[in-house]
Amino acid sequence: MIAVLQHIIPIALGFIAKLMALKAEDNKQRQEMMIKALSAQNQSLDMARKYDTPVANANRRLLLWFLMLAIMLSMLGYVAFDAPIYVEQVVKDPSFLFGLIGGGEHIEWKEIRGIPSFDELFTWMTVIVEMYFGASLARRG
């Protein structure tokens, strides 16, 4: 039994050492490939920045102003054209005996006038402005 173990243990240790060496070699190759990919990405970013001209900057600014104008007009259009805005309101009916009699709810539509405040529009406008200014801040000097 000891003789068999004397032959099996060196074989197993050699096998494990070879696997570790192969894994280290794979990690080395993976790191080299990542470094090459990062250098290629930096080159492509530098090439893209080379084409970032004042005209492209003006186009981005113009797009930003048009988006802001469209959002502003969509909110002020209700006032300019005197158009009503209808809002859904859920009304709860009264209940008696701890909710055993009556209760429930129904929907009423209320007419309002004025400038609406759309959370979605403000959220999208905030995202657009933040991305625009964030991109301009992240440039390399």
Image: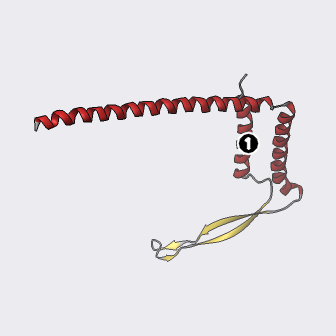
Three-letter amino acid code of the residue under disc 1: Ile
Question: Residue 106 occupies which quadrant of the picture?
Answer: bottom right
Q: Secondary structure at mark 1?
A: helix
Residue 131 position, x and y percent, is 71, 38
The furthest residue to the left: 1
Question: Residue 125 occupies which quadrant of the picture?
Answer: top right
Front residue of this view, candidates 85 and 139 = 139
Residue 109 position, x and y percent, is 71, 68
Residue at the spot 42% in from the left edge and 30% down from the top edge: 24
Residue 56 position, x and y percent, is 84, 35
- In the image, taking residue 130 as reference, residue 80 lies left or right, namely right
Q: Quadrant of the C terminus?
A: top right
Q: Which residue is mark 1?
A: 128
Question: Residue 126 occupies which quadrant of the picture?
Answer: top right
Residue at the spot 87% in from the left edge and 60% down from the top edge: 82
Vertical side of 119 occupied by 9: above or below: above
